[in-house]
Amino acid sequence: MPAYICPQDGTRADTTALTWCCPVCRGPWDLAFEPTGTLSPDSLAGRVNSLWRYEEVLPLSAPATSLGEGRTPLVPLTGTVSAKLDFLMPTLSFKDRGAVMLAELARRLAPERVVADSSGNAGTAVAAYCARASLPCTVYVPEGTSAKKTEQIRAHGARLEIVPGDREATAAAARAAADVPGTFYASHVFNPFFLHGTKTYVYELWEDLGGRLPDALAVPVGNGTLLLGAALAVAELHALGLIDRRPALIAVQAEAVSPLAAAFRAGADGLPDAPAGPAAATLAEGIAIPRPPRARAVLAAVRESGGTFLTVTEDEIRAAQLDLAARGFYVETTGVACWAAVGGWTDRSVVVPLCGAGLKTGLAAA
């Protein structure tokens, strides 16, 4: 089993413990893990048709909690822009990639309880996979979370805690609960097993494109879990000699809540020390994160890739959702942000993730 390691101070912990953050700085863990084998497109023939087909590069294997997640279609939208349809996952969002890793780890550790916090999609995914693993689960969500998402969480048998205030208040409530002995904190932000699930997004692209990647990967960024997973996969594929060129990472935020874009443009390595105020309202609720704990890692990953940050307005989000629907794809408002940002690109190949189904939030009001 790999070990947790703090990227800030080097503190290490055993992943068999229920230690959800670095005990020294209270920051998120990374995972001391390296792939144990090599892959090739030919070696994957005949394997299970889920993300678990990439077993050589995953920190867990032989799962009992799988719902068949992964292997979502890659569909061209224009001559240069393609979409990966991650809204076709079992719980209708890309968060299944990481949630299955957390639930599988929790199943093996057998805690008394599992807690999670979410603006919606991570909570529905953790609830579903905990149900699959027969684990008691409590999900904390902010008031104002989509009724369809809270309905889905309850349907999977999880206890729902609706927290007054914004996403930051919700995270604080969940972390207080995570400190209770016997609790596994299924955090898509603090637990790096989640990132090793989201990295399979890029392994699938590499396989579907015949052993290569596009010129750029556009990714919506709130806490940055898909972007950091993508960066992890790109680094691994390059280290394994499976790609010779790394794509640029294009991070997309809603203009209304764009702390990372502002820090990137200012040339900062992290966010200001002053606490942020309440997040502004945005249709892209899934990426409305004013102070992401992995901010420094996200900024570094984008810079190292030669990428950039882009922001989209509320009107652009509305228009992008309608445009995708007119093309046959009904996607939630957070999930259309990348199409709004790069849908008109013609100078290089780029893939956008359609991260969540439109049924989760409905059509944005005009």
Image: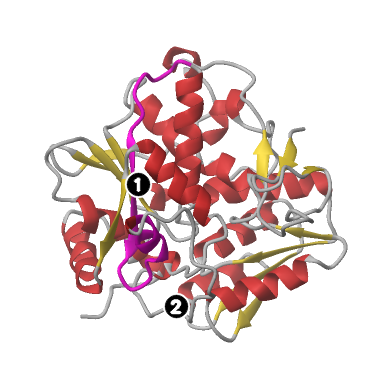
Helix, strand, or loop for circle 2? loop
Quarter where residue 115 is shown:
bottom right
Q: Identify which residue, 117 or 45, lies in the foreground.
A: 117
Identify the mark at residue 279; answer none if there is no mark: 2
* Magenta extent: 241-264
Q: Residue at x 61, y 81 (%)?
A: 162
Q: For this view, does 66 lie left or right of residue 334?
A: right
Where residue 60 appears, as percent x and y from the top left, is: 68, 34
> Mark 2 or mark 1, which is nearer the start of the sequence?
1
Identify the mark at residue 322; answer none if there is no mark: none
Q: How far, Cα to Cα, is label 1 from label 2?
A: 28 Å
Q: Identify which residue, 267 or 358, lies in the foreground.
A: 267
Q: Identify which residue, 330 or 240, lies in the foreground.
A: 240
Amino acid on which disc 1 is placed: Leu
Q: For this view, does 175 lie left or right of residue 351?
A: right
Q: Is residue 158 magenta?
A: no
Amino acid on which disc 2 is placed: Ala
Kindly identify which residue carries mark 1: 85
**351 versus 244 height, above or below:** below
Quarter where residue 41 is shown:
top left
